[in-house]
């Protein structure tokens, strides 16, 4: 496929402080409000008496959109591989735009506009708050957020989910011109990208922290 015909512009991110994909920068930078995710605890009740359950039959339900293929170990079809390549290109383009603008302290409106074009929905609100913190604190990114490994895990014509190892160990900040003490880390996240209205634009629609072996 020819990525030159695609202008990857958007994402939509689900949770955290730099669009998570881009960042988790709120969690990595001292002073930001980091979003903390906690897995819900589950309890299992036991009974001394054995019980038997009547078999139940679940009626199939119709869905409005195709169910994504969710088998990381499966071989992707040519069509799915093309979608994966488009989504990966969009993700990396957005990450590069973020790094470029953050290294300038989001001082240029054109850089802000470019970054914001990769987000919609709640993700857009999250990245807007992140940018506001940069401006308010006169913060400048030193180094870059890196994607150290990308693995597709779910694909449909409308969306692609990518497992990404986000590496912030080689980045730091200047706050009002003074070096800060970075707390970089490697965090595995899942980025879900959705097609935009033009069908050639991908938008990050979700970001979630996930434990795994990719990092």
Image (tube, helix red, strand yellow):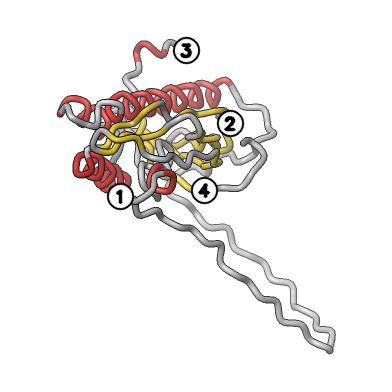
State the separation of the CA atoms marked 3 and 4.
30 Å
What element does badge 2 sit on? strand
CA distance for labels 3 and 1? 31 Å
| Relative side of 61 to 15, left or right | right
- Quarter of the rendering containing residue 203: top left
Q: Secondary structure at mark 1?
A: helix
Residue 161: percent from left, percent from top: 50, 38
Foreground disc of the pair 1, 4: 4
Q: CA distance from mark 1 to mark 2?
A: 24 Å
Q: Which mark is on residue 151?
A: 2
Residue 197 visible in the snapshot? no
Q: CA distance from mark 2 to mark 3?
A: 19 Å
Residue 142's place in the image compared with 137, above or below, is above
Q: Rounded to the nearest whole Å, what is the CA distance between mark 2 and mark 4?
A: 14 Å
Q: Which of label 2 and label 3 is nearer to you? A: 2
Question: Which residue is drawn at the image coordinates 33% and 31% (left, top)?
Answer: 141
Expressed as whole percent of the image width and height from the top left, the position of residue 111 reads 22, 26
Q: Which mark is residue 1?
A: 3
Q: Name the residue at 55% across, 28% down.
A: 148
Q: Residues within 10 Å of mark 3 (few under 14, many from 20)?
A: few
* Left or right placement of residue 71 versus residue 170 in this view: right
Q: Secondary structure at mark 4?
A: strand
Q: Earlier in the sequence, mark 3 or mark 1?
A: 3
**Which mark is first along the chain, 4 or 2?**
2
Residue on which the image places disc 1? 122
Label 4: which residue? 209
Secondary structure, mark 3, is loop
Q: Position of residue 102 (x, y in %)?
A: 29, 30
Q: Are marks 3 and 4 in contact (CB under 8 Å)?
A: no
Whether 212 is drawn above or below 42: the answer is above
Answer with mark 2 or mark 3, whichever residue precedes in sequence.
3
């Amino acid at each position: 496929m020819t990525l030159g015909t695609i202008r990857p512009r958007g994402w939509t991110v689900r949770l955290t402080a730099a669009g998570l994909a881009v960042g988790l920068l709120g969690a990595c930078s001292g002073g930001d409000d980091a979003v903390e995710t906690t897995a819900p605890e589950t309890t299992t009740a036991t009974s001394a008496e054995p019980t038997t359950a009547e078999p139940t039959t679940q009626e199939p339900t119709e869905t409005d959109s195709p169910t994504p293929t969710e088998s990381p170990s499966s071989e992707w079809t040519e069509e799915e591989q093309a979608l994966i390549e488009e989504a990966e290109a969009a993700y990396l383009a957005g990450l590069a735009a973020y790094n470029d603008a953050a290294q300038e302290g989001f001082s240029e409106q054109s850089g802000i506009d470019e970054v914001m074009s990769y987000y919609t929905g709640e993700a857009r609100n999250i990245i807007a708050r992140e940018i506001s913190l940069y401006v308010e604190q006169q913060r400048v990114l030193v180094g870059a957020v890196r994607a150290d490994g990308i693995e597709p895990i779910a694909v449909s014509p409308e969306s692609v989910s990518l497992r990404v190892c986000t590496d912030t160990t080689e980045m730091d900040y200047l706050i009002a011109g003074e070096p800060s003490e970075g707390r970089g880390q490697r965090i595995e996240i899942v980025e879900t990208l959705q097609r935009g209205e033009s069908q050639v634009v991908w938008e990050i629609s979700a970001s979630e922290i996930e434990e795994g072996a990719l990092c």
